[in-house]
Image (cartoon, rainbow, N blue to C red):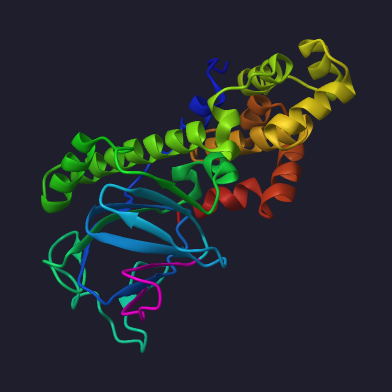
Amino acid sequence: MWEAMDPLSRLLTHPRASCAFSLLMTMRTPWAVNVNDRAPLTLVLVTRGACRLAPDNGADSELLTCGDVALVKGPHPYRVTDAEGSDDIAIIDEHQRCRSPTGEPLDLTYRHGLRHWGNDSDGPDQAIVASYTTVSSVGERILNVLPTVVKAPSGTALPGLIGVLLGELHADSPGQTAMLDRLIDAITITTVRTWATTSSAGAWLAGIDDEPVRMVLDVIHTRPEQRWTLNTLAAHARVSRSGLAARFTAQIGTPPMTYLTRWRLSLARDMLTDPYTTLDTIAARVGYSSAYSLSTAFTREYRTSPSAYRRTLTT
């Protein structure tokens, strides 16, 4: 049922942006924008000058220079600014409305065209900002593994892609929204791939040297519908239960059965985006005996039922 592929390719079957919010931000110092749009994932790509990106978790800000790319995992707020200590000039809320720190609307004040925004249309600092609007569009699996901020150096995103994306942001052509979505996906994917192949935290996605762990990951990814237990997974990998648990946890960071459950539920969550696929069908495809058992596990993991989650996708 499921095509065999490496863990990173599995992860990158999403993102699939759908009407992603995207714009070209151009600024002149001093400036800072406080973003509280609750987007699950945002891409920031500096095309001129520089900026600092500061997540709202106490972590140090990241300096981004021309060509650098960053992914910011939501839904927590973050700031984009010219320098540490600069005062906010704008606040972005969850409906992508822009206001001043004292509450005055700034949407028209800072607008310089269809997708061009900032305090100076010719300012020296410029960045592409694109936000995935729903968890389903970016993929639960990416959000499960990424840190709050992923920074990739200049050259990660191919210059050709950046040039086409800049051209689309300046244009107003038929099919433009779909084109922007696919370009944003391509840059996001290359950024995640760079992180996975250069960061110790994501190294397991790029390749597992431990043969039993690799075998177990493969069957979890390709045959999630089977009634796996720790015994049957260990037997498949030809190691003991305790040996598999220790090796898998050391390599992946979570026990094998926990990983299996989360994988099944993230697949189910993705499948819920199709309104014509019944819960019974989804349950069978991801290894649950009934819609009820899937619903119980789903609600425990996500604090909402599959039906309630599906309704949020259409509101």
Residue 102 lies left or right of residue 221; in this view the side is: left
Residue 253 lies left or right of residue 25; in this view the side is: right
- Residue 112 belongs to the span the image colors magenta: no
Tell me which secondary structure the magenta stretch mostly adopts.
loop
Question: Relative to residue 196, is residue 222 depicted above or below?
Answer: above
- Residue 84 belongs to the span the image colors magenta: yes
In the image, what residue occupies the spot 38% across and 59% down? 63
In the image, what residue occupies the spot 40% across and 78% down? 85
Considering depth in this image, is 214 or 267 the residue closer to the camera?
214
In the image, what residue occupies the spot 63% across and 25% down? 285
Q: Quadrant of the C terminus?
A: bottom left
Q: How many marks?
A: 0
Q: Position of residue 65 (x, y in %)?
A: 30, 54
Q: Quadrant of the N terminus?
A: top right
Q: Which residues lie in the magenta part? A: 77-91
Considering depth in this image, is 229 or 124 the residue closer to the camera?
124
Residue 216 lies left or right of residue 30; in this view the side is: right
Q: Quadrant of residue 108?
A: bottom left
In the image, what residue occupies the spot 33% across and 37% down? 156
Q: Quadrant of residue 123?
A: bottom left
Question: Relative to residue 299, is residue 217 depicted above or below?
Answer: above
Considering depth in this image, is 226 or 91 the residue closer to the camera?
91
Question: Relative to residue 113, is residue 199 depicted above or below?
Answer: above
Pick out the residue farthest to the bottom.
102
Q: Quadrant of residue 251?
A: top right
Q: Position of residue 117 (x, y in %)?
A: 20, 66
Residue 306 lies left or right of residue 98; in this view the side is: right
